[in-house]
Image (cartoon, rainbow, N blue to C red):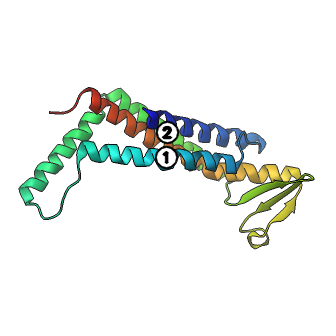
Amino acid sequence: MVAGVGGAALLLLAAVDSLASWPSNRVMLSHDDLSGIAGATLGPLWLWLIASFMLVVGVSRPGRGKEERAARRAAAKQIWGAMFPDRRVRIGLGIVALLCLGVVVGGFAVGGSKGSARMLTGPRYQVSVPNLNHSDWTDVPREQYDRWQAEFVREDGSFTFFGLFLTGGSLGLRQLHRRPPR
């Protein structure tokens, strides 16, 4: 459940921050803050989810016979089917996946970019972007700094998919825990 809650939080945070930046070029969390949260969330929770899947499904070992591999594939298929038996859950996850896709595509359409931003004392605002002074730190006014931050956050809209996979995988494992397949 921790991975599911962490994934849902990452999904919502990345989606809301990206969507909020569309009309105003203002963000709730800076690109660095959002990336830091994603890094702290994704690393341990992905490992936890992968280890959980491996414990449930098992790991195939090379050198086994055809029949045994076929039986293992059939068992894995049965497990995957048991993870999401409810049609409403599958439809819900599909709708959330479409919303995530909309956030990512919309963010690129509005204007997403890779780079970094920093605020120095003074205050002085600087950005490092590949298409501006060959990624050298460049002083910019506050308005441009906000615009670049918004573009960087829109680029981070893809974190929504990682959050969706964590949430969906955790929901599936929870379903398996409640009602394991035969």
> Which residue lies under the disc numbered 2?
7
* Mark nearer the N terminus (2 vs 1): 2
Q: Residue at x 31, y 30 (%)?
A: 175
Label 1 crowding class (10 Å Cα cut-off): few <14, some 14-19, many 20+? some
Measured as percent of width and height from the top left, residue 94 is found at 42, 37
Q: Are marks 2 and 1 in contact (CB under 8 Å)?
A: yes
Can you say which quadrant of the picture contains the N terminus? top left
Q: Residue at x 24, y 37 (%)?
A: 81
What's the amino acid at mark 1?
Answer: Phe
Answer left or right for 133 relative to 93: right
| Label disc, if present, on residue 162 of the rendered structure | 1
Q: Is residue 20 above or below residue 67?
A: above
Answer left or right for 103 relative to 180: right
Q: Is residue 80 above or below residue 125?
A: above
Answer left or right for 66 relative to 86: left
Along the viewing direction, whichever of 92 and 65 lies nearer the viewer: 65
Can you say which quadrant of the picture contains the C terminus? top left
Label 2 crowding class (10 Å Cα cut-off): few <14, some 14-19, many 20+? many
What's the amino acid at mark 2?
Answer: Gly
Q: Residue at x 16, y 44 (%)?
A: 75
